[in-house]
Amino acid sequence: WAYMGSLAKQPPFPNFEWTLVPSENRSLVKVREECNFLQAIEGAVDTSHGDILQQGAILNGPEDTGFNRPTKDIQPRIHMQPTAYGFRYGSIRTHISEPERLQYLRIMTFVMPVHCLMTSGELAQIFVPIDDDHTWNFNFSYSKEKPIDRERHRRQRRHVVGEDMNADGTRIPTMANRFMQDRDSMRARKSWAGMEGGPNRDMAMQESMGRIKDRAEEHLGESDYGVVYLRQYLLDALRANLAGGDPPGTASSVDYSTLRGIETVAPVDVPWEQAQPRARSSDGSR
């Protein structure tokens, strides 16, 4: 991290949760994206795309896994909560077996200017601009209770050098080879996108729209609310800073160690802002 403002206003070091665990309890992978950093962040902020793109298998098809999520609702109700450090994005879905009593919640936390604390909890992504056309995508997996299997983390992210990426951080699936898309699996209705691994599917979407997407060509809908909110939030922060104000995320009162994403099931009468992470079982799963 770098702070480039006035020394008189320098905030404390951002003590994110993963910076406080023992080194063996965290894993970092890094890959280069061939697009503007905002396109990469938008993919992380928008959780509704996962119901289709990240399904991997065709939704309700012969190999539908559903991510083992307790819902088939692909029309989430999206809500935003502005904060001193950025904002929280809450998506509410109908519970698959007890829709009258329960709701399935996915809450992503965006921390200015480039941090996304993902809904799965102990997972964070940071999208650092290299220039207008390239971005470093950092992915942190961590645990407060136990060491992280770093090789497993690399394989889950499809960031294995020699298989998925080159030693310099560039990816092997690219626009030039159509992101190694398997059209046969798509024709057989075994795969929605024909690509293995969520990160590969994400980055294929972000890069295939061009290094800097012409936003004038877009037709955004209700499920794009998180993307719209992010853009407006960044523009408002930029205007406020140019007018002499402090940008969000520099307040010394923020305790970053308490921030994380949340995925949980809660009673329908519990406000999403008050939702707590699901308890872990003895093996560390939720």
Image (spheres, rainbow, N blue to C red):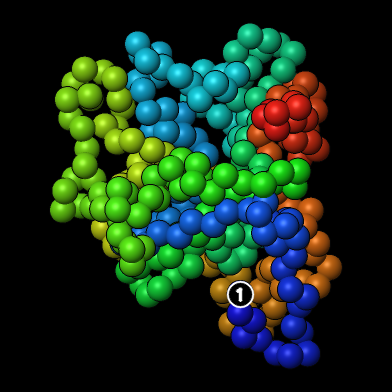
Which residue corresponds to the image point at 75% horizontal and 65% vertical from the top-left?
Answer: 15
Q: Quadrant of residue 149?
A: top right
Which quadrant of the rendered structure holds the N terminus?
A: bottom right
Instruction: Give me the residue at 37% from left, 28% from top.
Output: 56
Side (left or right) of 86 relative to 52: right
Q: Quadrant of the C terminus?
A: top right
- Furthest toward the right, the residue is 253
Q: Please, what secondary structure does the residue beneath circle 1 have?
A: loop
Q: Residue at x 51, y 25 (%)?
A: 67
Place of residue 273 in the rendered image (x, y in percent of width and height, measured from the top left): 76, 40
Res 137 → quadrant: bottom left
Residue hosting label 1: 1
Q: Is residue 215 visible?
A: no
Q: Is residue 208 left or right of residue 286?
A: left
Q: Residue 10 or 123: which is nearer the viewer?
A: 123
Q: Answer yes or no: is residue 75 visible.
A: yes
For residue 106, above or below residue 5:
above
> What type is the residue that disc 1 sits on?
Trp
User: Alpha-carbon neighbours of circle 1 within 10 Å: few (<14), some, or many (≥20)?
Assistant: few
Tell me the residue at 38%/50% (across/down). 160
Residue 12 pos. (x, y %): 78, 75
Give residue 206's position: percent from left, percent from top.
34, 51
Q: Is residue 173 above or below residue 238?
A: above
**Vertical arrangement, residue 61 with respect to residue 204, above or below:** above
* Nearer to me, 22 or 265: 22
Q: Nearer the viewer, residue 112 or 190?
A: 190
